[in-house]
Image (spheres, coloured by chain):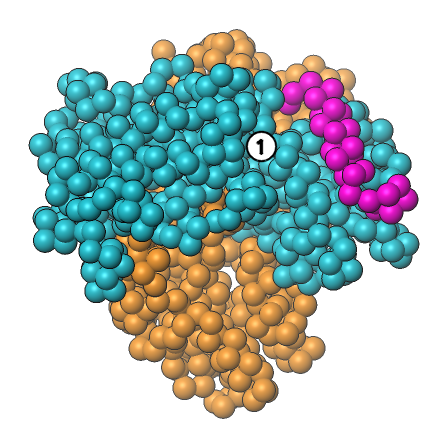
Chain colours: A orange, B cyan
Amino acid sequence: MFDKNIYIRRRRTLLEKMAETAPEGKRGIALFIGNVEAAAQYKNNAYKFRQDSSWLYYFGLDEPRLAAIIDLDNGEETLFADDVEIEDIIWMGPQPSVASKAAEVGIANSASYGTLNILATKALAQGRPIHFLPPTRYYNTMKLAALTGLGNEAVSKVAPMAAEGGRHASEELVKAVISMRLVKEDCEIKQLDDAGALGQEMHTVARNAVKIGILEQEIVGKMEGVTLSKGWGVSFPTILTQHGEILHNHVHDKRIEPGKLLVIDAGAENNMHYASDFTRTLPTGGKFTQKQREIYQIVCDCNELAFKLTKPGVAYRDVHLAAAKLMLDGLRSLDLVRGDLDNMVDAGIAGLFQPHGLGHNIGLDVHDMEDLGEDLVGYDPDQKRSDQLGLGSLRMARKLVPGHFISNEPGIYFIPALIEKWKSEKTDKGFVNYQKLERYYDFGGIRLEDDVLVTEDGARLTGPNRLPIQPDDVEMSMA
Amino acid sequence: MFDKNIYIRRRRTLLEKMAETAPEGKRGIALFIGNVEAAAQYKNNAYKFRQDSSWLYYFGLDEPRLAAIIDLDNGEETLFADDVEIEDIIWMGPQPSVASKAAEVGIANSASYGTLNILATKALAQGRPIHFLPPTRYYNTMKLAALTGLGNEAVSKVAPMAAEGGRHASEELVKAVISMRLVKEDCEIKQLDDAGALGQEMHTVARNAVKIGILEQEIVGKMEGVTLSKGWGVSFPTILTQHGEILHNHVHDKRIEPGKLLVIDAGAENNMHYASDFTRTLPTGGKFTQKQREIYQIVCDCNELAFKLTKPGVAYRDVHLAAAKLMLDGLRSLDLVRGDLDNMVDAGIAGLFQPHGLGHNIGLDVHDMEDLGEDLVGYDPDQKRSDQLGLGSLRMARKLVPGHFISNEPGIYFIPALIEKWKSEKTDKGFVNYQKLERYYDFGGIRLEDDVLVTEDGARLTGPNRLPIQPDDVEMSMA
C-alpha cells in the first residue's frame, strides 16, 4: 500500500469534486463495494484474489469483502468489514481488527459488513442519492442490486443522478473518478515503471525460450512464472501466437514452426496492481523473410512515429490517424493499396489492416477503467467516436496532458475472412489491390507495442530497457 | 477432450440413473449451465477460463457460454451456444459452428444460447420438473434464477424434487452425478497420474529453489510457471509458508529464514483439468533440528500408516481415526499429551493438533465436487458427520471402493490461539500437557500429503516419483 495520506488526499479530492454536483444536504452518499473471491472450480477454490481497481485507488486495502460509504454531505467515512472469529484464525492466522484496517488508510469509522445494508436502507428511506460505480463482477452486481433495491441491469447502467430518479450507477461519480485516475501521480508512475520492468523481463525470457518444435504454452508458462515470482501475475491473459491475425488468441496448443511470425502481447501486473503491456513480433527461426521484413518495417515505423507525436496538447486520435497514414503509405509502396493517402485515411482503409485502435490508457487496469465506460474514459466531451473499423475501436482519443499513460500499438494483420467481406461488399471503395493481397492470406500478423508516459515536454518510454524493435536488432537479439 | 463415446456413455448412464427417480413422463428435464469468463480487473479482462467440472464430465466442451438440456423422459439432448459473427472471427479466428461442436461430443440437437430461456419457460409452463446442480459461480446463480424464476438463494439449495414444489437444485441429480464422478474411470486415472507428475515436478522445482533470504513468492512463481508451461495451472492457490500453523496461508511476502519449517502444499491441474495435491515440509536450511525431526517423524509415520490402511472395504473415516491414534501416541511419547490413547481419540484430542480431516476426494476438482455438497460427496448414507474439531472437517468418510482417488494428508500444527482457547475452556479434558506445549508456540506446522488411488487389492501412490518424505531423504534431496 501507499502511505495512508495518499488515500486520505484522494478521497478529499473526490469529495470536493462531488460537492460540485449538488448543493450541500442534497449530495447523498457514495457507496463502494470491494471485490470478493472469485470461484475457479468451486466457491472455496478461488482464483488469485484481485481487488477492484477503484477500490484500490481510494481505499488501498487489498483483501476481499470490504465496503465503504463516504457521506458526501458531511464527509464522514465508514469502512465495512467482518472481524474474525477463532475459526478464521485457525485457517487464516491472526488478523488485524476492522478498526485497525480502517485506521491504516485513515478512515475514522468502521462497522461490520452486515450493517452495510442498514446504512443503505437508511439512505434510501431518507431519499438521499446513492452514488455508486457500475459493477464489473457478478457478485458486486448482485450486492448492489440487493442494497439499492434495483435490478441487476439497472445497477450496471450509468446515467446522471437526476435521470430516472437515480435508479442506476452514478455518472457524476464515474466522471469524478475518471478525472482523477486518468492523470497518474508520481507514486503511480514509479509503480508503472516497475510493472514495465517486469513486463520487459517476461518478454526477454520469452525471446530466449523460442525454439522450433516446442509448444507455445511452454513459452507462456515461463513468462508467467517470471511475473508470478516478482509481481501479482499477468495484467491480462497472455497472447502468444503464430496466428497474429487472430487478435485475441488465447490458445497456446501449437508447436513453434519455422518461418512463422510469433506475436507476443503480454504484460505484468506488479504487487501494487499496476499494469504493463508490451507486444513484440519475432521470426520463429530468428530471421525475417524479405516479405515479413517489409511489413514489419512499416509497423515499426508507425510505432516510432506514434511515440514521436505523443506529447501534451496533441489529441491522441490524431496520433492514431497519422500512424494510419504512414501505414497506408507503406502498404501503397508494396502495391497492396492504391490511391491518394488522405482520401484513404478518410475512407478508413487502414482499418482493414489494423482493425483496432492505436492505443489505450494503462494504470491499475491494462485498459484503464474500461469498467467505467470507454467513451467517458477515452473521449473529451467534444469528441465523437467514429464508426469506422479500427478508428471506431480507439479507446483513447483525448487531448494529451502530462501524466497520461498509454500504449502505442500499431499492427498489420491479414485476415482472410475480413478481406473477403470487404471485397464482396466493396467497402474499400476501390483503394485495395485484392489480387496482390491474396498472396498475404497465410502471412499472419504483426504488432509492436510500447508503454508511454506523457511528460511536461513530450513523452518517455517506460520500463528500464526498451525491448529490441528494429528488425536487425530483433534478429541479433535472437542469434 | 476424451473420445466422444465417453461423453455419450456417461450421459446415457446418467439418464438411466435419473429414470429410477420418477416414472416416465414425470421426469422432466436436466439443465446444465457451463461457466462464462470470470472478470479479473473488468469484464473483458478475465481470469484464465475454467469450465465447470460437471459440465466437463458430461459434455467435454471446454469453452465459455454453453448450456445443455437433457430431456429425461425421451432422452433428447440439446446443446445451446452462439454461432460466431464476422466481428468474432476478427478477434477470435474462424470458429466451428454450434452444430459441429454438438457433434464433437455426440449431441444431436443444437440451438442458440438465447433460446435456452424458451425451453426452460416451456418446461415450467408444462409443469415439468427442471433438475439442475447447485451453481458454484455468481453468473450461474443469476442465470439459473432467471431461467427458473427462482431467487438466488433458492437455486443454491439442494433438496429432493418433491420438496417445496421443486423450487431448488435437484438432490436426485446431485446424487446421480456424485455416484458417477466419485469412482474414477481408467481414462481419468491416466489424467490424474499426469496431473500427479506435474505436481511432483512443481515440488521438485520448489525444493531446488529454497534458499535463505529469497522471498517465498519467488519460489511460488517458479512452481506455477512449471504447471502453466505444461498444464492448465494450479489446482488451487499455492500454500507456501514458514507459518504452517496458518492452514490456508496464501500470503508469500516473507523472506526465507534459517531454521524454519517451510510447508509447501501445491498441486497441478493438467490441460484436461484433472488435479493433483501434494504437501511437503522442508527445513529451510536443509537440516531439521532435533525438535523439528521429532514432530516430523510422527507426521511421516501417520502418512505411511494412512497409505497402508487405504484399501477397498475400509471406511476412510477409520483411516483418519487410526492416524489420529498414532499421532497421539507420538505426541504422548514427547509428553505433550498424557492418558489412554483410545480415550484421547474418543475425546477428539487429535483435533487440537490437526484441526482438519485426513483427506478428501480428488478428481476434476482438488476437493472433488465440493460444490455439490460435502456430506453427499464424502459420506455414505449410514455415516453421520462428527462435530469434533478435526474429524468434523473430514471431507471423505466413505467405505473405500476401487477407483476412489484421495489425498492422505496428516499434519501437526501448534496454533497458539487455539491452544489458549482449549486451555481456558478445558476442552482437552485433562489430556493435554500445556506446560510442555508452550515451548512449541513458535514451532509452526508440518503436513505431508500424497495422492492415492484405491485399487482392486489395495492402493497405489500416483505420479511417477514419490517426493522424498522420510526426514533423511528430505535432507539428502536438499544437500
Return the x and y of residue B239 as percentages of the image width and height: 33, 39
Residue closest to the eye, B308 or A23: B308
The residue that appears at 11% across and 36% down in the rendered structure is: B291
Tell me the residue at 79%/39% (across/down). B20
- Say above or below: A232 vs B197: below
Answer yes or no: is residue B77 visible: yes
Residue A197, picture quadrant: top left
Q: Residue at x 64, y 31 (%)?
A: B180
Could you say which is closer to the camera, residue A342 or residue B143?
Answer: B143
| Image quarter of the N terminus of chain B | top right
Q: Secondary structure at mark 1?
A: loop
Position above or below: A176 against A277: below
- Tell whether B439 sits left or right of B195: left
Q: Looking at the figure, which quarter contains the C terminus of chain B?
A: top left
Q: Position of residue B27 (x, y in %)?
A: 83, 45
Residue A14: give x, y in percent of width and height: 42, 73
**In the foreground, B368 or A174:** B368
Using a 10 Å C-alpha cutoff, classify the residue at mark 1 as few (fewer than 14 neighbours), some (14 to 19) or many (20 or more).
some
Of residues B157 and B164, the one nearer the viewer is B164
Q: Chain of mark 1?
A: B
Q: Specify the amino acid type for callout 1.
A: Leu
Count the labels in the image: 1
**Magenta stretch containing residue B2, yes or no?**
yes
Is residue B387 located in the magenta-colored stretch of the structure? Answer: no
Relative to A150, B292 lies left or right: left
Q: From the viewer's perspective, tell me whether residue A429 is left or right of residue B172.
A: right
User: Where B385 sits versus A72, above or below?
Assistant: above
Which residue: 22% across, 37% down? B329
Can you give x and y, in whole percent of width and height, for residue A38 in the image? 50, 49
**Which residue is labeled 1 in the image?**
B182
Q: In this picture, which residue range is highlighted in magenta? A: B1-28
